[in-house]
Amino acid sequence: MKAPLGTPPGECPQCWQHAHDPNAHRHLGSREDCQACIACKAAGHPGTVPKQSRWW
């Protein structure tokens, strides 16, 4: 999975996109959960790019 532009290290690319793209959940009804977001959370956010350590 390729990270969308602007996804900071340590963040899940899918969750980051869904949180910042108003069109990501447009198809959902009021108080309806996004199944892709639920599956991503249950899987432990695969594709997350780890933060680079600043400790040398």
Image (cartoon, grey):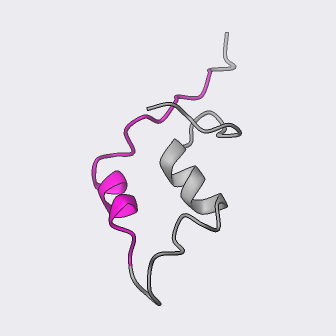
Q: Quadrant of residue 11?
A: top right
Q: Give residue 8's quadrant in the image.
A: top right
User: Residue at position x 64%, y 60% from top?
Assistant: 21
Judged by its main secondary structure, the magenta piece is loop
Vertical relation: 45 (above or below) 9: below
Going by the picture, which residue comes out furthest to the bottom?
30
**44 within the magenta span:** yes
Q: Residue at x 39, y 69 (%)?
A: 34
* The residue stretch that appears in magenta: 33-52
Q: Quadrant of the C terminus?
A: top right
Q: Left of 2 or right of it: where is 35?
A: left
Residue 18 position, x and y percent, is 55, 59
**Residue positioned 68% across, 37% down in the render:** 5
Vertical comparison of 50 with 38: above or below: above
Q: Quadrant of residue 33?
A: bottom left
Would you place residue 4 above or below residue 53 in this image?
A: below
User: Is residue 17 one of those drawn in magenta?
Assistant: no
> x, y percentage for residue 14?
49, 48
Q: As drawn, is 22 to the left or to the right of 15?
A: right
**Residue at the top extreme?**
56
Quadrant the N terminus occupies = top left
Image coords of residue 25 (percent x, y):
51, 70
Does residue 39 appear left or right of residue 21 in this picture? left
